[in-house]
Image: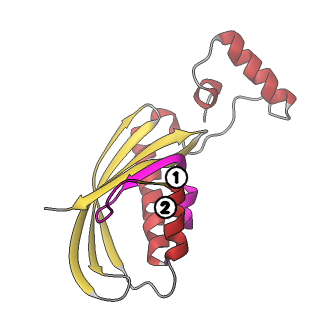
Amino acid sequence: ICGMSRCFGQMEPAMNFAAFLMAASLGGSASPAPQCATMFEGDKDRILEHIWQKEMAIYQGRANADLSYYLSNTSDNFLAWTAGTPKPYNKQEFSEKQKAISGNNKEIITTKFDGFTLSGNTAVIYYTNHRTRLPDGKIVDQKYDNIHVWVNEDCSWNVFASMSRPAN
């Protein structure tokens, strides 16, 4: 459950009460604060589980040549620098990549969890990808180290930054 201070930030008691009144006047509930299924009140294990499920859904979409789940779970301030790209790219540029994906994707990637850290509303997850087939079907043996920086925005965990490099 996401308390008022979690969803509205840390506020003075008078501001908390004002936010409560504003929410109630807009049709909000006078019961304890809004539900935030993704917040888990700082429970690191549950946050990790939630974010890892999102990571797996991102790669499932990718396997189906569909980045829409990934895009819908990125921050508006998203920035990524992935292996093979000459410079970082933002959410708008990433969205253009979605438009370029088409046809029958034959890519095969297995993902292995490597680590996780959490501080407040920011989490970093480390994982390794092993790609054995490219989207066009070509057999390869490629490994990449990856990180995603997740941020809890408005009670939803979103990818804020991404970086990958060829694994050693």
Residue at numbered disc 2: 94
Q: Nearer the viewer, mark 2 or mark 1?
A: 2
Q: Are marks 2 and 1 in contact (CB under 8 Å)?
A: yes
Residue closest to the far left: 168
Q: Which disc, if any, is residue 46?
A: none
Q: Position of residue 124 (x, y in %)?
A: 36, 44
Magenta stretch encompasses residue 168:
no
Quadrant containing the C terminus in the rendered view: bottom left
The mark nearer the N terminus, 2 or 1, is 1
Label 1 sits on a secondary structure element that is strand
Question: Residues under labels 2 and 1: Cα distance?
Answer: 10 Å
Q: Position of residue 58 (x, y in %)?
A: 47, 64
Q: Is residue 109 visible?
A: yes
**Which span is picked out in magenta?**
65-88
Q: Nearer the viewer, residue 52 or 97?
A: 97
Report which quarter residue 32 is drawn in.
top right
Quadrant containing the N terminus in the rendered view: top right
Q: Is residue 70 visible?
A: no
Q: Nearer the viewer, residue 41 or 120?
A: 120
Mark 2, other Cα within 10 Å: few <14 / some 14–19 / many ≥20: some
Q: Position of residue 144 (x, y in %)?
A: 24, 64
* Left or right side of 138 for 20: right
Report which quarter residue 143 is drawn in.
bottom left
Q: Amino acid at mark 2?
A: Phe
Whether 75 is drawn above or below 61: the answer is: above
Q: Which disc, if any, is residue 74?
A: 1
Residue at 24% of width from left, 59% of height from top?
165
Q: Position of residue 131 (x, y in %)?
A: 28, 75
Whether 46 is drawn above or below 136: the answer is: above
Whether 43 is drawn above or below 63: the answer is: above
Magenta stretch encompasses residue 81:
yes
Residue at 34% of width from left, 56% of height from top?
87
